[in-house]
Image (cartoon, helix red, strand yellow):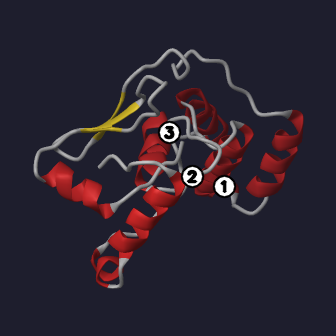
Amino acid sequence: MCSVRSSALRAFVRQGWSQQCVRKDLKTTAKLSATGSVQHIDADYNLETTPFDFTDENYGEIRKIMKRYPSNYKSSGVIPLLDLAQRQCGGWLPLSAMNKVAKILDMPPMRVYEVATFYTMFNRTKIGKYNVQVCTTTPCMVRGGYDILETVEKHLGVKVKL
């Protein structure tokens, strides 16, 4: 399973389309609505009550990360901690991991969700072993972004859902 993200998705959303961000065999946990907002949709593998805790090794890493920031700016560590949680979870970021990061940083969970939904580096649904991204923004389109996308689709035998 490959996940390809594209600026074309934003164009579809602006036109009123709805995009389900799912693997074929998994229930959805994220949905872009026609307004462009991202909603969490519970799935049996990604609930607020799903247990998550960092490993002892990662707690040591968290202590190292947090030493970089003054105590009154703990929330500055949100991106490194989300990245650590995503790595621990095998490439995706469950809701319970985002809640744990919020608790560690003493910040509202909504602020953590905002960061996780803003950056494309965070995957809020399970992904396959490889995550392939192809740029199809206007500058990339002019330089052949869609030709590259088509070649990748043919080579991997997958079809990108926009």
Residue found at x 48% / y 47%: 116
Q: How far from the left and from the top, in percent, is residue 65?
A: 76, 56
Q: Quadrant of residue 11?
A: bottom left
Q: Does dot 3 land on a helix, a strand or a loop?
A: loop
| Residue 106: percent from left, percent from top | 59, 39
Name the residue type under label 1: Pro
Amino acid residing under circle 2: Asn
* CA separation in Å, label 1 and label 2: 20 Å
Q: From the viewer's perspective, is 155 left or right of 11? A: right
Quarter of the image for the N terminus: give it.
top right
Q: For this view, does 36 lie left or right of residue 126?
A: left
What kind of residue is marked 3?
Answer: Arg
Whether pointer 3 and pointer 1 mark residues with C-beta atoms closer than 8 Å, the reply is no
> Which residue is the site of mark 1?
80
Mark 2, secondary structure of its residue: loop
Question: In the rendered image, which residue does mark 3 sit on?
Answer: 124
Mark closest to the chain's N terminus, 3 or 1: 1
Residue to which mark 2 is pinned: 131
